[in-house]
Image (tube, grey):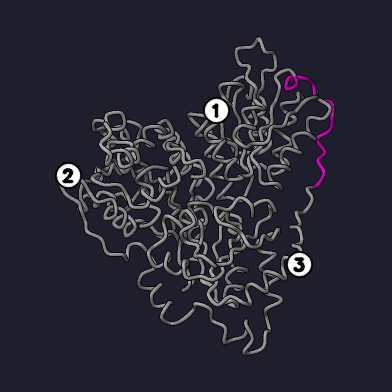
């Protein structure tokens, strides 16, 4: 057995479930060893797509993501996807061949590449310690929630492995105990609050029950960041997303809060709408495993609590349960949970309930009308993945999801072109749901190679392309000032024909009546994925885009 084979088998035995990649000479043996160890391997058509597939798979499955790439260009091709994963703290292991001889045409400083985007560079440096080094990379990825580059030097890979593959049992992960003083201060703030709002982020995706129970005691309203959208579906106090995608009602109620607690949530400029959702005098708390997270918020944080979200919420609930009537947390404590607020959330709490003027016409459909029509047609049990661009607010705001497992949002880096790969990784993590990819025309054309991957894998995916024949964000950012736009606008492209050439079914939508083609596909047999080429209106940008550009 050579070292490359030992590394692959060790990672498979430790728990890697699905790996993604593009195979070359430098990662051939380690990839085959993963497969021999029982890992499913998904071949992508581009390394950046492979990295994003693994990122989305890890987010939606709860398992570590694995990417396998060739040395040098294989890794450089993957860098955009790796930057997104690293910024999102996705548990991901990148297995990359490494040319260590500077005279090799494949040589680049792979450690520097990883560090530049926030990933953790590690290395299998010798045959004797190969398995231990691979398992340490796995530990860092999972326990520290980091994207790890595990470099596999070519000469070390080829060396005989003389060690043992008897792996120690993984240690059960015990979340750290929160500081008693920090918990006491958070209890005090909750006791003093009359209008608390909880905003849950990705770090709270496994804590719905704990946060819902605590919010009931405290009278708190519930919201999420974009990446945790759907976490509180079914609660009458669910405000949906906080930030740029917030409904007018959600923005109003969050601004009215006297205490905002971010649970596993960055409280970045998007979630706080550049700070405008946090009113002067509002107390802000962050609960996060990473103690340094409190200093990274876009708004000043009054209290940082280092700890696991679910554990902290349970601890607070244990203190509050049984509070006597009339106390701050007794049966009379309602916070903002009045009958009037409940009625307003029911009536105004989703974007599709907000009136708008339909501007469809001239061979183009209003993207709001398009998205509401798709929302009505598509099965409730869906998993929606979003690319970046001017269009992205429409599916994020007007298409509902059943829960936090129904929305995959790889947007920490705001790179366009990752959406289709995101949808593939999410679909493989949740095969029980209809995968829906929402792309702009620019991102669709960037990631178009992965259409073949969708067909080859037999995914019953609906791919919606919001086509304004432009990089719409730039058009609407620079156009009002009279700048020339020839560099960011394009002639029409028949995306439906391109899709059919890849083996997909396709429909072109220019008006609501054209959605009958989607309805027909849904009737079955759904033996081919469907691309919906939607020619959308383009006279003005989405309002949330204007908000987003304040950060540029």
N-terminal of the two: label 1 or label 2? 1
Q: Nearer the viewer's eye, disc 3 or disc 2?
A: 3
Q: Residue 181 carries which label?
A: 3
Q: Classify residue 110 as left or right of residue 466.
A: right
The residue lying toward the viewer, choosing from 347 and 430, is: 347
Q: Which of marks 3 and 1 is in front?
A: 3
**Prevailing SS of the magenta stretch:** loop
Residue 13 drawn in magenta: no
Left or right of 467, for residue 414: right
- Depth order, front residue of 445/338: 338
Q: Are marks 3 and 2 in contact (CB under 8 Å)?
A: no
Identify the residue at horizontal 68%, vertical 55% (top origin). Answer: 289
Residue wearing tag 1? 22
The range drawn in magenta is: 156-169
Q: Which residue occupies 63% across, 24% down?
A: 28
Of labels 3 and 2, earlier in sequence is: 3
Q: Neighbour class for label 2 at 10 Å: few (<14), some, many (≥20)?
A: few
Indicate left or right for 121 with 412 as reference: right
Residue furthest out toward the left: 362
Query: Disc 2 marks which residue?
Result: 363
Q: Is residue 126 above or below residue 320?
A: above
Which quadrant, please, contains the N terminus?
top right
Q: Residue furthest top?
A: 103
Q: Residue visible at 68% across and 73% down?
A: 187
Dot 1: element: loop
Q: What's the distance in space between the residues labelled 3 and 1, CA to CA?
A: 50 Å
Q: Is residue 21 visible?
A: yes
* Percent coordinates x, y for residue 364 in the rendering: 20, 46
């Amino acid at each position: 057995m050579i070292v490359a084979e030992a590394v692959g088998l060790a990672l498979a035995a430790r728990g890697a479930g699905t790996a993604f990649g593009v195979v070359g000479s430098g990662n051939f043996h380690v990839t085959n060893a993963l497969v021999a160890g029982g890992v499913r391997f998904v071949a992508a058509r581009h390394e950046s797509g492979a990295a994003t597939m693994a990122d989305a798979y890890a987010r939606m499955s709860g398992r570590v993501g694995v990417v396998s790439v060739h040395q040098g260009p294989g890794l450089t091709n993957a860098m955009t996807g790796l930057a997104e994963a690293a910024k999102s703290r996705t548990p991901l292991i990148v297995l990359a061949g490494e040319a260590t001889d500077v005279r090799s045409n494949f040589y680049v400083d792979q450690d520097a590449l990883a560090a530049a985007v926030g990933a953790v560079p590690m290395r299998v440096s010798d045959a004797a310690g190969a398995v231990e080094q691979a398992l340490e990379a796995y530990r860092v990825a999972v326990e520290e929630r980091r994207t790890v580059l595990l470099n596999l030097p070519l000469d070390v890979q080829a060396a005989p492995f003389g060690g043992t593959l008897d792996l120690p049992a993984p240690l059960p992960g015990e979340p750290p105990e929160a500081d008693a003083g920090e918990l006491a201060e958070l209890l005090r703030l909750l006791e003093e609050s009359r209008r608390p709002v909880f905003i849950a982020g990705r770090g709270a995706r496994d804590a719905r029950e704990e946060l819902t129970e605590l919010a009931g005691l405290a009278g708190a309203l519930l919201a999420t960041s974009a990446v945790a959208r759907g976490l509180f579906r079914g609660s009458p106090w669910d405000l949906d997303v906080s930030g740029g995608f917030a409904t007018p009602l959600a923005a109003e109620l969050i601004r009215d809060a006297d205490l905002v607690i971010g649970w596993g949530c960055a409280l970045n400029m998007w979630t706080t709408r550049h700070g405008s959702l946090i009113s002067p005098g509002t107390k802000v708390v962050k609960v996060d495993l990473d103690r340094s997270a409190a200093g990274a918020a876009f708004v000043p944080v009054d209290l940082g609590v280092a700890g696991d979200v679910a554990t902290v919420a349970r601890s607070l609930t244990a203190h509050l349960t049984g509070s006597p009537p009339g106390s701050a947390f007794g049966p009379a404590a309602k916070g903002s949970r009045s009958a009037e607020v409940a009625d307003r959330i029911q009536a105004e709490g989703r974007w599709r309930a907000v009136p708008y003027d339909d501007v469809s016409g001239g061979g183009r459909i209003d993207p709001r009308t398009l998205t509401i029509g798709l929302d009505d047609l598509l099965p409730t049990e869906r998993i929606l993945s979003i690319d970046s661009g001017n269009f992205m607010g429409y599916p994020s705001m007007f298409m509902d999801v059943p829960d936090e497992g129904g929305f995959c949002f790889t947007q920490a880096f705001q790179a366009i072109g990752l959406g289709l790969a995101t949808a593939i990784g999410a679909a493989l993590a949740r095969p029980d749901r209809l995968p829906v990819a929402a792309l702009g025309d620019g991102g669709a054309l960037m990631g178009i190679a992965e259409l073949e991957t969708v067909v080859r894998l037999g995914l019953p995916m609906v791919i919606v392309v919001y086509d304004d024949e432009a990089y719409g964000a730039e058009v609407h950012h620079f156009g009002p000032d009279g700048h020339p736009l020839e560099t960011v606008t394009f002639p029409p492209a028949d995306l439906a024909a391109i899709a059919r050439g890849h083996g997909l079914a396709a429909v072109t939508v220019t008006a609501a009546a054209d959605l009958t083609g989607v309805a027909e596909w849904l009737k079955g047999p759904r033996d081919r994925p469907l691309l919906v080429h939607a020619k959308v209106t383009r006279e003005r940008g989405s309002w949330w885009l204007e908000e987003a550009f304040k950060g540029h």
